[in-house]
Amino acid sequence: MNFIQNISYKNIACLFSCAIFFILTSCEEDLTKANGSQSKNFPSQIINNANIIQRDSGFVTMRAKAPIIEKYELIDSPYTVAKKGIDIQFFDKKKPKVPGTIKAKYAKFYDYKKFYEAKGNVRITTNEGQKFAMQSVFWDQRKKRIYTHDTVFVTMEDGSTLIGAKGMTAKDDFSEYTFYKNTGDFSTAKIAESKK
């Protein structure tokens, strides 16, 4: 009788241990699954005081400076972000000594889409000296188009000005652009007026 009781107690203890093991394992798996999605939402690279130079066949096409750049590469739509602002110089082979510039308080680049956005006191100066001021701008690199829906203030090299109250679209080299609901004190062949 005593022997049978000992066996049954051992069986119960064994079953209880197995049950605890399976409960803990399933909890660990659930925690891994739950943390798996969260663990990807952090920068895989952080560059402090970034100074990036991009070249094409030895020619410097771009210089970018930012207090901090973070790359998020482990997620489905990887992107790079400059949360504390960015200052970019872009160079044209025809005018290598006169770079254009883009400055903004925030910038983001989507790797796969080849799509840029800049926000917060955006300032663009072209190689020809035209100055654009707006609160946000978007660049679709694949389509080679830049656009914004914000009011755009443009100052030409000669001091004349234009305002696009409902935004603008432009080729990414600013060889032509369209302003919406524009007003100003000059006319130029490059500008296509629109009443949209």
Image: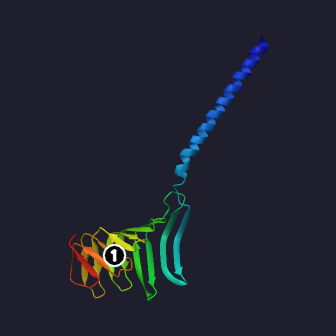
Kind of residue at badge 1: Ala
Image location (x, y in percent) of residue 136: 35, 68
**Quadrant into which the N terminus falls:** top right
Q: Would you say 137 lies left or right of 8 here? A: left
Q: Which residue is mark 1?
A: 170
Please name whichever residue, 68 or 192, is drawn nearer the observer in this view of the structure. Answer: 192
Q: Which residue is at a point 55% across and 84% down the rendered structure image?
A: 58
Q: Would you say 87 lies left or right of 57 here? A: left
Q: Which residue is at a point 72% across and 18% down the rendered structure image?
A: 8
Q: How many marks?
A: 1
Image location (x, y in percent) of residue 75: 52, 57
Q: Secondary structure at mark 1?
A: strand
**Quadrant into which the C terminus falls:** bottom left
Image location (x, y in percent) of residue 68: 50, 67
Classify residue 117 by image quadrant.
bottom left
Please name whichever residue, 196 or 109, is drawn nearer the observer in this view of the structure. Answer: 196
Q: Which residue is at a point 48% across and 81% down the rendered structure image?
A: 61
Q: Farthest top residue?
A: 1
